[in-house]
Every structure is written in C-alpha cells, then in structure tokens.
Image (cartoon, grey):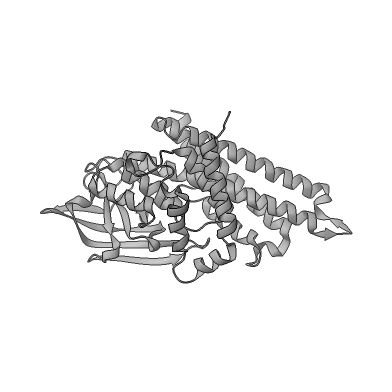
Amino acid sequence: MDFKINDEQQLLRDGLTRFLATRYDLEKSRSAAKTGQGWQPQIWRAFADELGILGAALPEDCGGIGGGPVEMMLIAEALGHNLVVEPYVDTAVVAAGLLRRAGGEVAAGLLEQIVSGTAVVTLAATEPGSGEHWRDVTTTAERDGDDWVLTGSKIMSTGTPLAGHVLITARTSGEHDDVAGISLFVIDISSAPTGFEKHDYRTIDDRRASDLVLDRVRVPAAALLGPEGGAWPSIARARDEGAAAVCAEAVGCMRKVLADTVEYCKQRQQFGQPIGGFQVLAHRMVDMYMEVEQASAAVHLAILNLEESEPTRARAVSAAKATTGRAAQFVGQQAVQLHGGMGMTEELAIGHYFKRLTALQYEFGSTDHHITRYAQLTTR
C-alpha cells in the first residue's frame, strides 16, 4: 500500500504540530479537564480562526476547505499525540458529517458555526440496553401539529456537556431494531427545552459526557434533519467515520507513548546500565513498535476506503478498529510496565495516555464488536 500525502496536507500537519507543541500544555489541559468547564474554549476558537482545522475535512460548499478523510486522519493523529480533550471527532467529524449529508437550512447554519468555531454539536445515539447497536432505537418522535414530540433516553453522549446543540436519533416508525424508521433531530440545548434533562459527568480519560432524558420534548418541524425515517445510512457512515478518526487518534497516542517509553528506558539505570540495554526489554519495545506500525497501516487502509461502498467501508473500518484496539491495549500495558509504578501516577504523562488508549478501545464499537462485524462481512 503506497500512502503519501501532498504538500498541502503536509503543511496542515506541520502547522497543527507546531501549534500543539507551543500552545497546548498537557498539565494545563489536564487541569481544565478535571475542573471548571472541562476544556479550553480559547483553544477551540484557535483551531478555527488560526488553523482552520474544524473545516479542513469538509467540502467547500459547506464552508470547509475541500479536504476529506486524509485531512481528518492527519488532524486526529496530531490531536491524539498531544492528548487533546476538545471534541474534534464528536463535532467536526461525526456531527458535521451528519449535518452535511442531511442538508437543509438548519443543517447548513450549524455547519457554518462549527467551521467558525462558534458552535459545538454532538450526537446522542446510544440508549440503555442497546449495547453497541445504534440501530436499536426506542426513543420515539411523534407528530403533534406542526411540531415533533420526542420521548426516550440516551446514554454516554460524549462532548455534549460542552455543546449547544445535540443530534438525537429517534424512531418515527417501525420496530425498535428496524433500520427503516430511524430519523435524526437537532435540539438546541442552550435554550433549555421543557422536558429535557442532561446529566453530565467526567469519564475515566478526562473527557466529558452526558446521559439524556427526553420527556415529551417539543421541537419544531425544522428540527428534523434529512428524510423522515431514512437517517440510518448517514448514521452508519458517521459511526464508521468516527471509528476511523479515533483509530487515527489512537495511533498518535501510541507513537507518543512509545517515544516516551524508549526515552525513559534510556535514562532509567539498573545494575549500572540503562534498562533499555537489557535484551528482553528491548524486545518488548520492538514489539510495541510493530503494533503501532500495524495499527497505522490498518488506519491508512480504512481512510482510503472511507468513501467506498458500504460493505467495503465497513470491512476496512472494522479491520482498523480491531487492529488498533489490540495495539492500544498492548502498547499501553507494556508502557506502564516498563515505567514501573510511576506509569500509573498523575505526575507522568504515560498514565494519562494509558487511560485514553483504554477508552479508545470502546468508542464507536469495541474491539470485540468490530472483530465480529468483520467476520460477518467477510463470510457473506
């Protein structure tokens, strides 16, 4: 597989790398994540105003700069390398993709605000009891005059505590696990709609998430995005795009973890010599390197197939998610072991990266889920 980036993509990567190296301090970001708002809004605005990355992977007709999956991969990997907590994947990849494919005046307005950094939009698709199957939707939307009335609940909606709008999957027809009948609605949560409850919390990897309760929440007809009952193809694609993005983020995390581990093993002395000189530990670091490179290759394959037909895209994404999940577990655990007890402390960056690598294994479908899906797709 020959994967090369062009000059513009290289400039995008270099500019973002320099910005994060000079402006994104890990200690400051951890402090922001654990207290107050949970993120740094000024960094988010800089992503838009100074770097333009919030629209880098979007076409020009919706306010972007005409990029695509490769730009998304480069951005996500750089953000993962610096353990950025701002909701790039949730907003600029998943929500933006759904809004772009939905079309319409409301979606276009929100897309413009995402690109300009003035809006954070997230998706709430997981429900209690649905496990990892986004198609299992029991939240309902019923017509009432010119409005829609939404009733149900959602869990683990990442980034939503930071958002002003949330996209909700709701069933307008069919049984709870039918693909047909799933619709997509947008709710302006900044206006505190009647019947809408949001329970925010901090996740193990210092992100923010919400559980939502919708008790006959009334929204206008314009809140329906795309065709009634026909949202599933776009939602399925958004999930694959999100999975590919977090795989790229995981590769960035693992490259940083590997580099820090190698450097630590060069400095840590045991029996009068650096522990990196011991053959058994050197072999471990080689194994870590091989896992990172295999994950990187799998991500490249997924990115190159992200705009192909649904079966081709799904196979490539599941292969990448399974490969990256295995690598994230191995690299994270080996890095902690090689650092000893210090590896799990708050003082070292490695502990924070380990938590993120653990969480990434479950976002947009767990490793086991994607292994199963890959097997099903290859035996049809």
Q: Which residue lies furthest to the front in this view?
A: 50
Q: Which residue lies furthest to the left in this view?
A: 145
Identified at 71% across, 64% down, the residue is: 341
- Residue 22 at what x, y percent from top left? 59, 58
- Residue 90 at what x, y percent from top left? 42, 52
Q: Residue furthest bottom?
A: 36
| Relative vertical location of residue 227 with respect to residue 274 in this rendering, above or below | above
Residue 239, by quadrant, is: top left
Front residue of this view, candidates 115 and 182: 115
Identified at 23% across, 41% down, the residue is: 227
| Relative vertical location of residue 45 with respect to residue 347 in this rendering, above or below | above
For the N terminus, the image quarter is top right
Front residue of this view, candidates 23 and 297: 23
**Left or right position of 119 against 315:** left
Front residue of this view, candidates 60 and 317: 60
Q: Is residue 291 visible?
A: yes
Count of numbered badges drawn on the protein: 0
- Residue 155 at what x, y percent from top left? 38, 58
